[in-house]
Amino acid sequence: MNFQRVFSLARKDLKKMIREPATLFLIILFPVILTLAFGAAFGAIGGSQQTTYQVGVVNMDSTGPYQQWSQHFIGNLTDTEILAIQDYLSNETAQADLAQGKVQAVLLIPSNFGQSCNSFLMAPANPSLWVNTTVQLYLDSGSMFATQAIPPIIQQVLTTTLYGSQQISVPKPIQIGSPSLVEASKLTAFDYMAPGIFAYAAIFLTMTVAQSLTTDRENGLLRRINTTPTTPSEFMTSQAISNMIAALIQVALVFAMAFIVGYRPKGDVVSLALAFVIMSIFALCNVGFGLITATITKSPGAATGLSFVFILPQMLLGTFVGAALSPSAQVVARFVPSYYATDALTSLFLRGAPPSSTTILLDLSVVSICSIVVMLMGIVLFRKYGKT
Amino acid sequence: MVVDRSPLTQNTIKEAVIVLDNLVKRFEDITAVDGLSLKVEKGELFGLLGPNGAGKTTTINVLCGLLEPTSGSVSVGGHDVQKEPRKVKELIGVCPQDTATYPYLTGRENVELFGNLHAMSKEKLKKNADELLARMELLKDANRRLGKYSGGMKRRVNLIMALIHDPEIAFLDEPTVGMDPQSRRAVWEFIKELKKQGKTIILTTHYMEEAEELCDRVGIIDYGKLIALGAPEYLKTKFKAKNLEEVFIQLTGRRIREGL
């Protein structure tokens, strides 16, 4: 492989990102605007001006032998200060208020909630002895902010209620800490969303790669490069390098913007460095999707449209929006690479997990495998059908 | 087929650097090139002429390794294009028919990119770029983005990109199309200089005066077949024509006459 060729092609692509207004917007300005907009909408900007969401809670486990668990859970929800909790005696009344917009969400705590928590406490390493149950969440579909902000907050509080705030730093065996240690009160809704925004920006690389390649193909530039000694592997490596650099710039910009609007994630420099690594690997996956899109489509316009086949599922299922979806959609989300990239960043920045924790390593592995598979598929398809 | 019996015929070529042997290229049910056999001598400036759709660009694309022949063989610089495409690509420079440049790069950046793709040294690349940009009167505008260039300037950059690495063999596919007469003359002079440097050039063109002015020999193809081959003077004498355009019309005019 001749790196003079690789770097000159990568440099050319980076110049395109900076010099072409449409590409500049997608790669650089879009993540900046997105971060600032979400920062303003979800409470990171303005410090004390914190957004509050009205959440109705129907506790069907208020009289059982393990009722203290549901009380802790509700107490932890209240302590977040983002959620204003209203107690309801019946689901019907709560649903009626939700329909009228008096509350933005209703949480139904099942009668075996405490029993389930207790079964976990008694046998944390033996899932066969656990009593499984489901906390139902109903959201005001008319409130976009509520549907996006509330589910991750509740998910986080539920996790902390079960495990306590110290669990992440102790790899094994899992310790169940005191529910009273919840520290979510200092977080804003933006803190729950920020990891998704990092992935959100990189997802659009699919579109820029597809547009760029179809434009170059339409203008005869791919054929022209093919008359030089440049090999397909050199060309593809240049694509990977330039887009990984773009992803790193995006992460740096999103982080800088988020920091400016008040975002203070957990984790240290190593965590931040790992976030950059995860996102640059995730970028490769989107380069692969871009290559597949460019293979299938004949023109830049068609490439833009078709790229949304890959962009939308990743956006809606794999980033912060995914948490607002139905349980079945959340199962589907497990097949979307952005889900694991977002989850890894959530563990690093929100849960304060160390870079060596099992969750992060698992997420990193899934993102890496997905990226390699998608990129290889993209390369094979583009080489065979996409160059002319 | 009309074949030249004057000097530099197929039989008198001493060192052929481009050899097409019964080349056939089909696209589904269309035969673009139909049994084309041809030899081009080292240092020769060979004109490939023919009406639109005659198979000129397809032939160039096969020679560059962009298209695989349906049958027959093609060698460039002593290397089989199918078996040793990389060796061929190291020898050739290709100026495509349609301008293929990056509008967001400057003129110089476009040229230097292709120099880098041919792995030129930094010093040699700068020297060649300066010389060629100056020769094409583009030095003053070299650092402007190509998207802001006029059509003629873009075509000149298109040509420089093909020649930046000083190739032994150049394929120039209608390099002067769309240029004003002054620019065209300048490019002609430049192509003559390339010939003087000993480069082998295959030139396709629709401008018969261009072929007459520049080419040692021309091959006229129609419907993918070679229908005449020889020096412009020989063909003019043979067909009792005042110029090459008359020869061309006599040989290929049936399309117009027959309304094809």
Image (cartoon, rainbow, N blue to C red):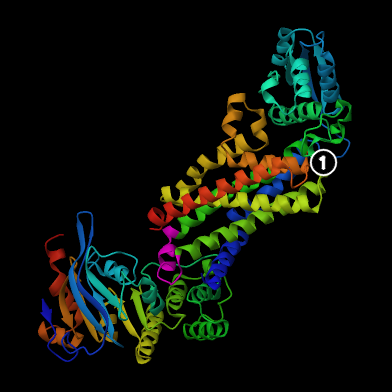
Residue A207 locus on image (x, y percent): 54, 49
Using the rendered image of the protein, determine whether residue A250 is visible from the camera's viewpoint.
Answer: yes
Identify the residue at horizontal 59%, vertical 57% (top origin): A243
In this picture, residue B134 sits left or right of residue B239: right
Residue B95 location, x and y as percent? Answer: 39, 73
Is residue A87 shown left or right of residue B189?
right
Q: Residue at x 43, y 53 (%)?
A: A380
Q: Which residues are magenta?
A: A217-231
Position above or below: B163 against B29: below
How many labels sit on residues?
1
Please tell me whether residue B47 belongs to the stretch shown in magenta. no
Q: Is residue B142 above or below residue A74?
A: below
Q: Which residue is mark 1?
A: A45
**Residue A221 falls within the magenta-colored stretch:** yes
Q: Which SS class for mark 1?
A: loop
Q: Nearer the viewer, residue B77 or A303?
A: B77
The one of B99 and A378 positioned closer to us in this rendering: A378
Residue type highlighted by circle 1: Ile
Q: Residue at x 63, y 38 (%)?
A: A339
Horizontal relation, residue B238 to residue B243: left or right: left
- The quadrant holding residue A136 is top right
Protein chain holding label 1: A
Location of residue B216 by image quarter: bottom left
User: Residue at horizontal 50%, vertical 53%?
Assistant: A211
**Residue B179 visible in rendering:** no
Q: Which quarter of the rendering shows the C terminus of chain A?
A: bottom left
